[in-house]
Amino acid sequence: MNHDALIVGAGFAGAVAARRLAEEGGRRVLVLERRSHVGGNAYDCLDAAGVLIHQYGPHIFHTNDRRVFDYLSRFTKWRRYQHEVIADLPKDGPGEAGGRLTFPVPFNLDSLRAAFGEEEGERLGKKLLAAYPAQSQVTILELRQDPDPEIAAIAGYVYEHVFVHYTMKQWGQTPEEIDPATTARVPVRLSRDARYFQDAYQGMPLEGYTPMFESMLDHPGITVELGTDALDRLTLADGGIELDGRPFAGPTIYTGQADELFGYRFGPLPYRTLDFRFETMPRDFFQTHGTVNYTVDEDFTRITEFKRLTGQEKPGVTTIMKEYSKAHTGAEGEIPYYAIINERNSALYARYAAQAARYPGLHLLGRLAEYRYYNMDAIVARALALTDSLL
Ligand code: FAD
Ligand code: UDP
């Protein structure tokens, strides 16, 4: 079949773009995906014990964008789910003798009581509310600037017990050294709302992410080739884009790494990668919440228990996953999960983006191709906007 649109990658960016170009644009779309499956990092599957797991880290869908939610809802029903996370840390005091402390993350008025005791926590909570009467939340970096000594002490506590060690594990840098938008994702809540996200639409695809992707890509105008590295088929020649050695005039939407597309000619873009360690246990449940963040000790950042997210009913067995973060070295099989956003890296990315701009039919789309820290809904919104302009 002759194709007149090419898409590299079958994650959210690629799948949404493919569906729209085929269905609404009447195009014959070729999707090339390097992995053996669709879904990108949102891919889920049953493990050997029959537990539905997220192969590339826990994915919880949340958005305030009605258009995004409506678009995806064509391809899946939803399980109502509001993600809650707790911090698990050693109680202050010498050694292990003190035991463990847990409280909600984002740190909220209940966390304050858990950390400072009922009465003192209550009093400090009132003080915080009085200091920020018009806000429902405040970022840790803002709170640390507060001149009031008692509020500064709360900020110091939260910084030390929630942010600094976790951020060091995740990024190898302190909260001051990383993009402030990153820690702002997890604010200090001036309420008792224990939900991790407050978006209007939240949930999990009822049958899982992978069936949602399969449904999206199931269209007569779409051909998906799995296990295919597009860089073996695509050439950015002086005269324009070539597919399989022939000039290709249709739109080309590339959702992989921008540096890789151009042979790393300006040097590699820095990323963090993750090691995921899965453990399956013969018990109903391992922990009380979908995700538990180890904010002070342990080498991993968090433990997720999939049954708590997916609602899968499977007595007598459960699978958990620990996440270990480290620098991406480009070694075989390592996946670049997080762009490290700072001025220097953004400037390096801009050089690659400028190369891409020389090809009018080439569009960089997605978390990798745009070198951004996008949630799923943001990528879907970007894919809808790009395809609006192409349709
Ligand atoms: P990807 O999912 O990375 O898809 C890109 C695809 O392109 C991949 O399948 C890749 O194999 C393919 N590809 C790349 N290069 C080539 C090539 N040369 N040839 C062929 N194929 C190629 N978002 C949320 O909203 N909620 C969450 O709870 C959440 N949790 C997350 C947890 C973790 C640990 C991580 C890392 C991310 C999380 N995200 C979450 C973000 C979410 O994963 C992304 O927003 C989303 O996957 C981005 O989709 P994408 O299509 O841009 O990229
Ligand atoms: N963070 C933290 N402690 C926590 C949770 C988050 O320090 O308990 C910081 C950390 O720097 C992290 C960032 O906030 O990288 C964003 O957290 P989020 O849970 O949004 O990260 P993601 O789910 O994208 O990995």
Image (cartoon, rainbow, N blue to C red):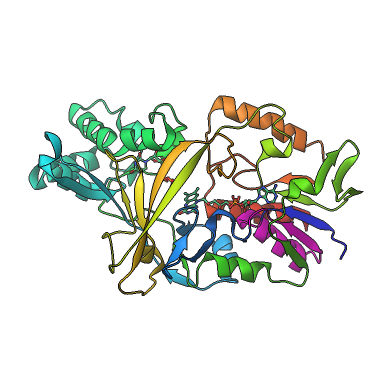
> In terms of image quarters, where does ligand 2 lie?
top left
Magenta-span inclusion, residue 19? yes
In the rendered view, tell whether residue 190 sits above or below residue 44: above
Quadrant into which the C terminus falls: bottom right
| In this picture, residue 333 sits left or right of residue 145 | right
| In this picture, residue 75 sits left or right of residue 354 | left
Q: Residue furthest left?
A: 119
The percent position of residue 56, horizontal first and vertical second, equals 50, 53
Whether residue 148 appears in this view of the structure is: yes
Q: Which residue lies at the image location 59% right of the left edge and 55% below the top edge?
A: 40
The percent position of residue 228, horizontal first and vertical second, equals 72, 54
Comparing 70 with 284, the one in front is 284
Quadrant into which the N terminus falls: bottom right
Magenta-span inclusion, residue 265? no
Q: Which residues are magenta?
A: 10-35
The percent position of residue 66, horizontal first and vertical second, equals 54, 62
In the rendered view, tell whether residue 59 sits above or below residue 207: above
Whether residue 24 appears in this view of the structure is: no
Q: In the rendered image, which quarter is residue 91 located in?
A: top left
